Image (cartoon, rainbow, N blue to C red):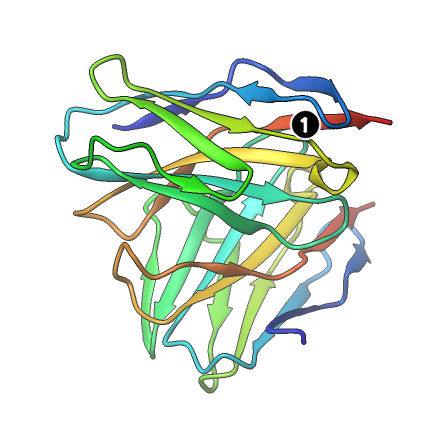
Amino acid sequence: AQTVTQSQPEMSVQEAETVTLSCTYDTSESDYYLFWYKQPPSRQMILVIRQEAYKQQNATENRFSVNFQKAAKSFSLKISDSQLGDAAMYFCAYRSLLDDKIIFGKGTRLHILP
Amino acid sequence: DAMVIQNPRYQVTQFGKPVTLSCSQTLNHNVMYWYQQKSSQAPKLLFHYYDKDFNNEADTPDNFQSRRPNTSFCFLDIRSPGLGDAAMYLCATSRSRGVLDTQYFGPGTRLTVL
């Protein structure tokens, strides 16, 4: 069974600085998708970025980028120029091409310090 | 514009008293999901509907049931809530079950069991 591990329950970063959230996963599959979701306080969870495992190029969405290391099964999220609105719980997630289920990590709560 | 709406946002029930949580969507998506998210844990899929086809996760307790009377609405029924069922319940929708179809989440209903 696949697992997703986020080893940092909480992190803090100064506004305008860069922060990296870590995620590792375990799978025996060769093709799959990885995601980062953001859940702001009392608001709905939204998709931040998606990576297809067969693509070597790291995905980027504006200030958000990933460092995907397939051999190491690592999928970290980098947030550049952190803003107060980035404060949220961030979930790393895995989805097999063979399944309807998204497997989430336990999340990392990110605090932005003004 | 609200796309996935969950009512109520906060629900308090008594031990053993049946409770129903509601989810509606304005996206006309075919798939609706229910997740359980306990404190400091990853969201866990309980079941999902693909149109009228109900798909239960193997480890979802029998205490949890779901109904989808039409495309727009989906309900989560907890027949006899226990203290361990206190959690945030998230509803999500997607256009189809394809891995590239983004899941859109509602804000969640936080259930307290007294």
Q: Where is residue A18 in the image (x, y as percent from the top left)?
A: 62, 22
Up the image or down, B65 lies above or below A78; here it is below
Identity of the residue furthest to the right in this view = A114
The C terminus of chain B, quarter of image:
top right
Q: Which residue is drawn at 36% across and 38% down?
A: A59
Q: Which residue is drawn at 49% across and 18% down?
A: A22
Can residue B61 be seen in this snapshot? no
User: Helix, strand or loop at disc 1?
Assistant: strand
Q: Position of residue B70 (x, y in %)?
A: 46, 87
Up the image or down, B29 lies above or below B46; here it is below
Up the image or down, B110 lies above or below A84; here it is below
The N terminus of chain B, quarter of image:
bottom right
Q: Which residue is drawn at 60% across and 60% down?
A: B79
Q: Which amino acid does label 1 sit on?
A: Arg
Relative to B35, is B80 on the left or the right?
A: right
Residue annotated with mark 1: A109
Who is closer to the viewer here, B27 or B35?
Answer: B27
Can residue A63 be seen in this snapshot? yes
- Choose top left, top right, bottom left or bottom right for residue B5: bottom right
Identity of the residue furthest to the bottom in this view = B70
- Choose top left, top right, bottom left or bottom right for residue B8: bottom right
Q: Where is residue B80 in the image (x, y as percent from the top left)?
A: 64, 55
